[in-house]
Amino acid sequence: MKLQNFLELLENHKLFRKESINLLASENYSSPIVRAILSSDLGNRYSSDYYGGTKFIQQIINKTESLIRELFDADYAIVYPLSGNMCDLALILGLTKSGNKIMSVEAGDAGGYPLNYEFFNRKFIPFNFSLEDMNILIEESIEVIKKQKPKLVIFGSSFFPFPHPVKDITQEFEKRKTIQFAFDGSHVLGLIAGKQFQDPLREGCPVLVGSTHKSFPGPQGGLIVTNDMHLYETLFSTFDIDLENGIKLTDNVHAHRIAALGMAALEMLEFGKDYASQIVKNTKTLATTLNNHGVPVKFKHLDFSDSHQVILDIPSYNEKTLLRERAENIGLLIDSGIRLGTAEITRMGMKELEIKEIGEIFARVYHNDITNELSWRIKDFARIFSSPTYCFNNISEMPF
């Protein structure tokens, strides 16, 4: 009975997702090959050469690093992080010391990643930020950096509709070697890989980190890339499996995840530019459709968004929660921050025509004009767009 109940839960989740349209900005859909790798024998194996039987695993890790370097045009890559959060911990623990100041976008209305810096005995300094333009204020932030002298400055955000002014700020501190800059591209990593957002490594940020399962359509995990050998060595040391001196951030780095990441990188090398370009087109189409149907979309004066996120202007948390629940009841999945993401629906093959209809359905949900017909329309969409695109469907399609 317990086995049956457990299997029923798994089946219920599978059916629920199969009949839903995912507008969560933090999720994506991996290809069949990536999913197959995740469920392969690698999932039960260790990766360290301390263990026997790892010679091919070591080659897989090296190949994945090579593919990531190629994708992001970087000299060094670290694929050990188990999450984007782990990447941020590597930045904090590798590049700062106890009591140091760290500057990043503030959580809450500004949408920064809500990391507890005090827990790590670091002092948080927020960027000066414009909520109207959802971006960092350049001159004001430069003055704060000069005054506060943070050890580490991290660009990037969880609410991320527009590129951050990396070059405008970093060029002011080119000769100040005491300040380290980094870019957390967790949400926009797929757009960066697809050359459709910004290029932090060429704009003055020597380190790019990020999650690999949001706009980047890989397995859950993280990566770090840089062109600076010293930074690479410093950050890699936080993950290095050193049995003699003791384990740090990781012990087993999950070889199946790294192999799946390598396959996702291959797909992005082949299809990434087209995929990322369509994401941005779909985002603007969704935002425009919602706006035309009376849904309050933020940043109309900036053409709404340049990323995979459409952010609605709903100040009340209760209203946000009610809207999320109404949407989920008909099969539209969103988060309580009311960020509507287009990465997964683009991955599933939807383009502007379908996005307009999704926007019209969501507008009816927003206006509480809900009928059973909407649920059936969502199920039809989910059935028609049930297989991922911009990916290899079988080995024979792969370019080698």
Image (cartoon, grey):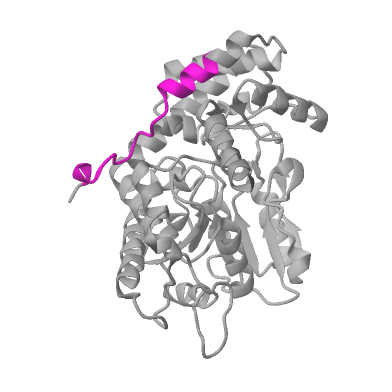
Q: Is residue 188 above or below residue 75?
A: above
- The answer to whether residue 46 is left or right of residue 304 is left
- The answer to whether residue 311 is left or right of residue 261 is right
Total count of labels:
0
- In front of the other: 118 or 102: 118
Residue 378 belongs to the span the image colors magenta: yes
Residue 46 belongs to the span the image colors magenta: no
Residue 289 falls in image quadrant: top right
- The answer to whether residue 226 is left or right of residue 64 is right
Q: Residue 158, image x and y in percent?
A: 63, 45
User: Measuring 56% from the left and 18% from the top, which residue is drawn there?
Assistant: 359
Q: Residue 8, image x and y in percent?
A: 58, 38
In the orientation shown, which residue stands out farthest toward the front?
1
Q: Quadrant of the N terminus?
A: top right
Q: Residue 113, image x and y in percent?
A: 67, 51
Q: Residue 259, image x and y in percent?
A: 37, 59
User: Measuring 48% from the left and 17% from the top, which residue is drawn there?
Assistant: 380
Q: Is residue 79 visible?
A: no
Residue 246 falls in image quadrant: bottom right
The span shown in magenta is 377-398
Q: Is residue 5 visible?
A: yes
Q: Is residue 235 above or below residue 371?
A: below
User: Measuring 69% from the left and 64% from the top, which residue is drawn there?
Assistant: 102
User: Measuring 38% from the left and 42% from the top, which residue is drawn there?
Assistant: 31
- The answer to whether residue 42 is left or right of residue 158 is left
Residue 43 falls in image quadrant: bottom left
In the orientation shown, which residue stands out farthest toward the bottom?
244
Q: Is residue 72 above or below residue 86?
A: above
Q: Is residue 65 above or below residue 17?
A: below
